[in-house]
Image: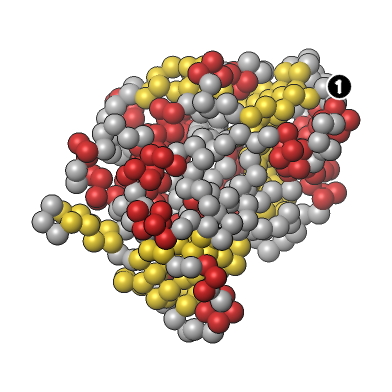
Amino acid sequence: MSADLIGGPGRTVTAEQARRFVLESLSDVPLDGRSLCVVVPDSTRSCPLPELLTAVHAAVHGRVSRLTVLVALGTHPAMDEAALATHLGYAEGRLVQTYPDTVVANHEWWVPDALVSLGEIPAAEIAELTQGRFEEPVVVRVNRHVVEHDVVLVLGPVFPHEVVGFSGGNKYFFPGVAGREIIDLSHWLGALISNVEIIGTPGVTPVRAVIDRAAALIPAQRLCFALVVGSGTKDLHAVAFGTPEEAWAASAQVSAQTHVRYLDRPVRRVLSLVSDRYDEMWTASKGMYKVEPIVADGGEVVLYAPHVDEVSRTHGALIEKIGYHCRDYFTGQWERFSDVSRSVIAHSTHVRGAGTYDPEHGERCRITVTLATGLDEARTRALGLEYLDPDLVDAEEWARDPDTLVVPNAGEVLFRLRG
């Protein structure tokens, strides 16, 4: 079967069209008397979430026995009440007036009791799914809300992604509302393949295969509205409905034609003007991931984000301990880092980009990564990155340099070389 889809590349789905599509799609789902958990992204994704969640609520209220909205944080910090209200579209403290009979919850990944085990994917199966890169079993844990509802509905956008190829679909479960075991395995798997190789790759990548296999263990019925949203806007290009696998596949095809820009030749320097929706390096680094493929050997990526003054509120101490390095730096001396979370190491390699390492010559990275952020020079250089005072950056002047590409609202649109 294939997903139902409205919109497409270069098209616009109006708010009324989207609302009608949601209502009609859910009218055919047997929800009466069943409990429903709606899994949504946090605020790091462009998405007209209030409009769509309002439509979902209208379609199911009075039919379902229980309704929970679960925010897929991955390992991002929790959203407080003010942030949740803005994100979901209700007045602070007045959830019941906008979404009656609805519970809103963060994915409390840091609370052991918030997670339940779905079992284990055996080592032999992991070896097959990862094309031989790993041969180890992995315990699959997920937020208990997903297990304790009859139906789970993913509601979120699809973009090119540095770990899985294209985000969305079952990725909202793993890593969105998952335990650390599969988060670590999937992120390090993506890092081993490398950002440049996997980001924007169509079809089922090895990481997507692991995620889909884990999602098959969820006992609830799984459904999905997969969205294609204009980067930095609330403009909808497409909405697909079906299983997470079907809806994601349909929207990923649209995203590939919407969120990828092609250049004819590499550039020497990129200035990524990082979106304000990324407020720490853990997420602001998407301004590096999305442009690495177009930077010439020996070139530079400058992340301009004066608003970012934290490495990560969750993982900052560990990242600052190990710094940012290429993949081969870690694989070449794994015994030094065997006790470090593999998802943290993966983040480090994605930020630093491609490179080589050997004991004689040390680390040699393909490009330079420079931060023009709220992090001071000492902290920046201690991370292993170059520093630039953000007050010295004049984006308009840089844009006049033929060897520089200035990318506004950086972090969601992927840049690739044609051919």
Q: Outermost residue toward the left? A: 360
Residue 113 percent location from the top left of the image: 54, 15
Q: Nearer the viewer, residue 374 or 285?
A: 374
Name the quadrant of the N terminus: top right
Q: How many neighbours does mark 1 have within 10 angstroms: few (below 14), some (14-19), or many (20 or more)?
A: some
Q: Tell me where residue 122 sits by quadrant.
A: top left
Whether residue 275 is visible to the viewer of this picture, yes or no, is yes
Please state the total of marks drawn on the protein image: 1
- Vertical order, 328 against 364 (above or below): above
- Residue 135 location (% of width, % of height): 27, 30
**Residue at image location 57% in from the left, 42% down from the top:** 168
Say which element carries label 1: loop
Q: Is residue 87 left or right of residue 187?
A: right
Q: Is residue 281 shown left or right of residue 36?
A: left
Q: Which amino acid does label 1 sit on?
A: Gly
Q: Quadrant of the C terminus?
A: bottom left
Q: Depth check: 38 or 238 in front? A: 38
Residue 250, horizontal then vertical, whole percent: 60, 47
Q: Is residue 149 above or below residue 373?
A: above
For the point 57% across and 75% down, the residue is 395
Which residue carries the number 1 mark? 62
Query: What residue is at 44 percent from the left and 46 percent from the top?
Result: 163
